[in-house]
Image: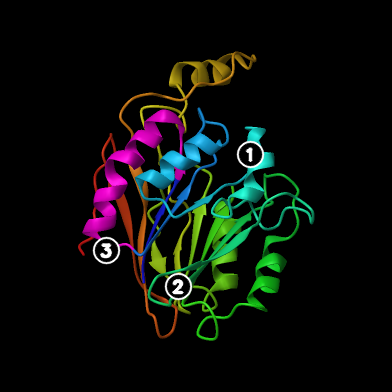
Amino acid sequence: MNILLLGDVVGRAGRDAVAAHLPRLRDALDIDVAIVNAENAAHGFGLTERIAGGLYDAGADILTTGNHVWDQRELIAYIDRDPRILRPANFPEGTPGAGWRLQELGDGRTLLVVNLMGRLFMDALDDPFAALAALLGKYKLQLGPTAIVVDFHGEATSEKMAFGHFADGRVSAVVGTHTHAPTADAQILPGGTGFISDLGMCGDYDSVIGLQKAASVRRFVTKMPGDKPQPAEGEATLCGVFIETDDETGLARRIEPVRVGGRLAPHLPTP
């Protein structure tokens, strides 16, 4: 199975990059499922129904989120009507929406997509390790889904790495999101799980994590509050990873970075 996962889409620049590049990537890499983290897609903060529709039109199959999931209040009422939008599965019981989705492909294969959020330097949610363990008690590679991928939305690289090793051999891939900076540690762990600490963002890298740099620098220098940060609007780099899994074992055969457009050095996997 060929899976494309894209990092946090930040504002209009990030959405434009997805619209410009995702259709071509789907064709070039023969993508079966495209997963996009969309929690910053609405002017840098949250997601709306209209913007979700635009990402689907560009070729996204599933949208994951994180700590900004509720920044646009309209999503609270909408998320139960759109099972393709995930919020972290370790939110408390009774939270609107779902934290995982079993995506059916037209050929009979299935992909379990799980969205979880870390707790180190983040909101105090339920234990993501226990949440995954409970889910894997129901869904096991080779006995159920053809592949299982986890978007682990977290601040701390240590927590993400620990989670990757915790899941190694039991899921196809664990990819980190949230920091908006792509890491260089894409690898297949010893048990066969693809891993990267952070996908980076689909956004303008002439910025401070996708936000206009002057205002962000001013806040650090003066330690004074200011207006709400605005997304940077230059040409964005689309960042993510391409993962190929083995349909027999469900484990990763390959994981490679994807970078297209904008300021960062390009990297496109060969088909």
Please name the residue that numbered disc 2 is placed on.
189
Please name the residue that numbered disc 1 is placed on.
75
Q: Amino acid at mark 1?
A: Leu
- Asked if the residue at tag 1 contacts the one at tag 3, i.e. Cβ–Cβ closer than 8 Å, the answer is no
Closer to us: 228 or 83: 83
Q: Position of residue 92 (x, y in %)?
A: 78, 54
Residue 221's place in the image compared with 26, above or below, is above
Q: Please say whether residue 40 is visible from this viewpoint.
A: no
The range drawn in magenta is 8-31
Disc on res. 30:
3
Q: Position of residue 46 (x, y in %)?
A: 58, 35
Residue 30's place in the image compared with 216, above or below, is below
User: Count the marks: how many?
Assistant: 3
Precedes in sequence: disc 3 or disc 2: 3
Q: Which SS class for mark 3?
A: loop
Q: Position of residue 226 (x, y in %)?
A: 61, 13
Mark nearer the viewer, 1 or 2: 1
